[in-house]
């Protein structure tokens, strides 16, 4: 029984080595270079516009949510106030920086929403980017 197990193990190793040899000889380990983009991606953007719009709406809803909603500006403001009241200066600084960033997201997302509305109207008038 032991002899048979050894023979099977050796045969398996030889088979695997035999298959790996040609795969490495033809350069199968290196990926082919990516092709240069040929267009502006209008068709793909038109296809994804609805999902992008929903994602922006979800993010704005979360940021503008009440103090009970995770990720809202109000909740983070409350956490900053709690850290200040407890005298945790380092925590207050860290959370304050996060709050500053989170507040800066609002105008960015609003701009993206208006830009995306213009993209959607372009897509509607250009057959969803198929003509580009």
Image (cartoon, rainbow, N blue to C red):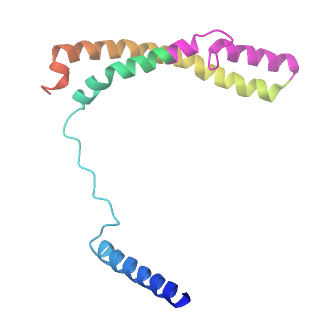
In which quadrant of the rendered view does residue 25 lie?
bottom left
- Locate the N terminus by quadrant: bottom right
**Closer to the camera in the image, 32 or 88:** 32
Q: Residue furthest left?
A: 131
Q: Residue at x 59, y 23 (%)?
A: 101
Q: Relative to 28, is 72 on the left or the right?
A: right
Q: Main secondary structure of the magenta part?
A: helix
In this view, the residue in front, 66 or 15, is: 15
Relative to 37, residue 114 above or below: above
Residue pictured at 51% horizontal, 84% vertical? 5
Percent coordinates x, y for residue 111 in the rendering? 41, 14
Task: Tell me if 110 is positioned left or right of 26 in this view.
Answer: right
For residue 11, side relative to residue 90 (left or right): left
The residue lying at 78 percent from left, 14 percent from top is 81
Residue located farthest toward the front when viewing the structure as drawn: 1
Is residue 38 toward the left or the right of residue 90 in the image?
Answer: left
The answer to if 121 sits in the magenta stretch is no
- Segment tinted magenta in the rendering: 59-87
Image: 64 above or below 51: above
Image location of residue 16, percent across then percent down? 39, 77
Q: Which quadrant is the C terminus positioned in?
A: top left
Which residue shows up at 34% across the image and 80% down it? 18
- Image coordinates for residue 73, horizontal then vertical, percent: 63, 14
Q: Quadrant of residue 120?
A: top left
115 or 55, nearer to the observer: 55
Q: Classify 53 as above or below 5.
A: above
* 21 in relation to 70, above or below: below
């Amino acid at each position: 029984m032991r002899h048979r197990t050894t023979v099977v193990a050796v045969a398996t190793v030889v088979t695997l080595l035999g298959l790996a040899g040609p795969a490495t000889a033809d350069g199968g380990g290196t990926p082919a270079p990516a092709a240069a983009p040929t267009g502006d991606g209008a068709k793909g953007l038109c296809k994804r516009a609805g999902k992008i719009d929903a994602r922006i709406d979800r993010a704005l809803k979360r940021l503008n949510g009440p103090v009970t909603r995770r990720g809202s500006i109000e909740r983070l403001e409350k956490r900053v106030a709690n850290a200040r009241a407890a005298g945790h200066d380092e925590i207050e600084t860290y959370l304050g920086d996060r709050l500053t960033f989170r507040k800066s997201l609002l105008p960015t997302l609003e701009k993206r929403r208006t830009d995306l509305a213009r993209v959607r109207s372009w897509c509607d008038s250009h057959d969803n980017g198929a003509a580009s």
